Amino acid sequence: MLTHYCDAGKPAPMNGKTSPDRKDRGFEFVDVAASTQYGHMHHAYVHAIDANHHSEEWTFMEGDSPSTHTLKFSGQNDEVKSLTRFENLMTVSE
């Protein structure tokens, strides 16, 4: 379970599944206690590229309109933050 806290002010809980090779983890929206009138984070996907790189794809839903953004983490400056973040996502219980 991953809970995304965003500027829309609605914590969006998401259930996660890890790929068999543990390089990918996808999260899908479960529900939200408040109204989704102003949108919510609907999907998150994390992909391990190698030991020092990973990407994240986040999809925000506003009504029936998805907006997807991809973030790529690489390089020495991001290495510790991104790998720690990735490892935390990969060890979240199913």
Image (cartoon, rainbow, N blue to C red):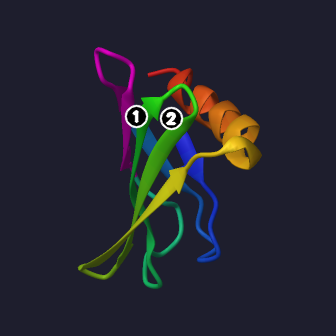
Q: Which mark is residue 1?
A: 2
Task: Identify the residue at horizontal 40%, vertical 34% (top origin).
Answer: 16
Q: In which quarter of the image is residue 58?
A: bottom left
Task: Identify the residue at horizontal 54%, vertical 25% (top origin).
Answer: 51
Q: Quadrant where the C terminus lies?
A: top left
Quick check: is 29 in the magenta stretch?
yes
Highlighted range, magenta: 17-30
Q: Are marks 1 and 2 in contact (CB under 8 Å)?
A: yes
x, y percent for residue 48: 44, 33
Task: Identify the residue at horizontal 62%, vertical 67% (top origin).
Answer: 6
Tell me the SS state at disc 2: loop
Task: Identify the residue at horizontal 49%, vertical 59% (top origin).
Answer: 71
Q: In which quarter of the image is residue 17?
A: top left
Q: In this view, does 69 lie above or below 17?
A: below
Q: 16 or 81, which lies in front?
A: 81
Q: Decide if residue 90 is on the left or right side of residue 31.
A: right
| Residue at mark 1 to residue at mark 2: CA–CA distance | 6 Å
x, y percent for residue 82: 65, 41
Q: Which of marks 1 and 2 is nearer the N terminus?
A: 2
Q: Residues within 10 Å of mark 1 (few under 14, many from 20)?
A: many
Residue identified by numbered label 1: 16
Q: 41 or 49, which lies in front?
A: 49
Q: Decide if residue 45 is on the left or right side of residue 50.
A: left
Q: Decide if residue 34 is on the left or right side of residue 48.
A: right
Q: 79 or 27, which lies in front?
A: 79
Q: Tell me the kind of residue under disc 2.
A: Met
Q: Tell me the kind of residue under disc 1.
A: Gly
Q: How crowded is mark 2: few (under 14 residues within 10 Å), some or many (20 or more)?
A: some
Q: In this view, does 2 lie above or below 72?
A: above
